[in-house]
Amino acid sequence: MSMGTKISRMYMPLAVAATLAMALSACSGGTGGGTEGGGGGAASENLDARGPITYVQGKDNSEVIRPLVDKWNAAHPNETVTFKEQTDKADQQHDDLVQRFQAKNGDYDVASVDVVWTAEFAAKGWLQPLKDKMAIDTTGFLPATVEAATYKDTLYAAPQTSDGGILYYRKDLVATPPTTWEEMLAMCPIAKEKGIDCYAGQFAQYEGLTVNVAEAINTAGGTIVDKDGKATVDTAEAKAGMTNLVQAYKDGNIPKQAVTYQEEQGRISFEEGKLMFLRNWPYVYNLAKSEGSSTVKDTFGIAPLPGKDGPGASTLGGHSLAISVDSKYKATAKDFTAFMITEETQKFYATQGSLAPVMESLYTDAELVAKLPYLPVLLTSIQNAVPRPVTPFYPAVTLAIQQNSFAAISGTKSVDQAMTDMQAAIAAAGSK
Ligand code: GLC
């Protein structure tokens, strides 16, 4: 299936929910620039203003941001950028942004926004529409990254880095990586013999769990929502996907402690040589290759996620740069945003941090591919990646997925019960 088809199928917003969000945010009167492309109020203010700004994003794992900010600051002494670094935990990053944006004091001028936060933040009226004077050029970007930064036909953020799940494996223990989930589990005795864990992804109760559960469900032929945004997890396919995780956890092929893993805990276990297979994002590649503490530098390989009959369906991840509608210095914010997504910057993200470029041509750039041989695997992962539901009520939707899948994995609910409850909770999320 082409990427276009997949995106248009998955990117249909929860129409009813979105309308409600509009009504709610209008009632609360706190939207400043409004929600339909930001005609007036804060969205039309400070567009030509220049001055010092703050850029905020999650933990700079691979030290890519500081050098870029230093470079910018050296060239713009009157428009310096202060880098506010958040934790490495996706939910904490989200909650910090919500708090600051709600305060409407322009504390954060430019923020790195996860693909799943765009609809929520845009519907609340917190993001500056990137059009007219604030327009950002996204020519040549992977369509999925632009879609993910768009809400109601308006671009609200500039795609910065994409993300697709990949399978890290120990090539010294497994000659050929598994292509199916079954094949992978059949290799677990090798790990057992070595006294190490077999497989882990992100199974703590937070956004990463939604990512992993969505992958299991989509890979088994299920979906989370249909094209109209209606919950579809109470199906045989979705249950089969969930059962794969539940069973692997029960059997010990996913180790007990994996229910506490976010991205970093799994990465560390893999780098310490304690894990044979790891589902994670591309940022791990650079760290596992270069960190002094990595014991697997020369012994790990990467492959597409294992699937049902072939490669699995990754969940689409990634981040975009959004400008706060309350920023006092939007001309600076816009120029800094543009600087953070140039081709040169994109190459730096890739070479320095093994982050996934949003510019499509970089995946076939001969020089870059020679340096980063994993790029073709990554492109396949991203091109086949399935977006998570697009809705202003995403926090409630993801909570419904997390709570019920966590209960199923840890054995406090049967898969049947968990999926029935998940179905009801996703449906209710759209009317909150
Ligand atoms: C990565 C992805 C993001 C996802 C998060 C979950 O940062 O880019 O989309 O939501 O992981 O932890």
Image (tube, grey):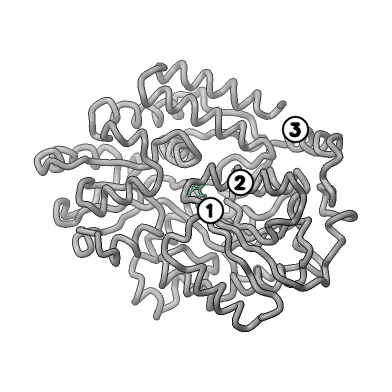
Q: Which mark is residue 269?
A: none
The answer to which of 310 and 367 lies nearer the viewer is 367
Q: Residue 80, located in which quarter of the rendered image? A: bottom right
State the image coordinates of residue 361 (x, y, percent, origin top left): 51, 73
Q: Mark 3 points at which residue?
A: 16
68 w.r.t. 194: above or below: below
Q: Name the residue under label 1.
A: 86
Residue ID at (77%, 36%): 21
Q: Is 355 on the left or on the right of 178, as rendered? A: right
Cβ atoms at labels 1 and 2 below 8 Å apart: yes
Cβ atoms at labels 2 and 3 below 8 Å apart: no
Structural distance between the alpha carbons of marks 3 and 1: 33 Å
Q: Mark 2 points at which residue?
A: 96
* Precedes in sequence: disc 2 or disc 3: 3
Which element carries disc 1, helix, strand or loop? Answer: loop
State the image coordinates of residue 338 (x, y, percent, origin top left): 65, 72
State the image coordinates of residue 40 (x, y, percent, origin top left): 90, 55
Mark 3: give few (<14), some (14-19) or many (20+) Cα within 10 Å: some
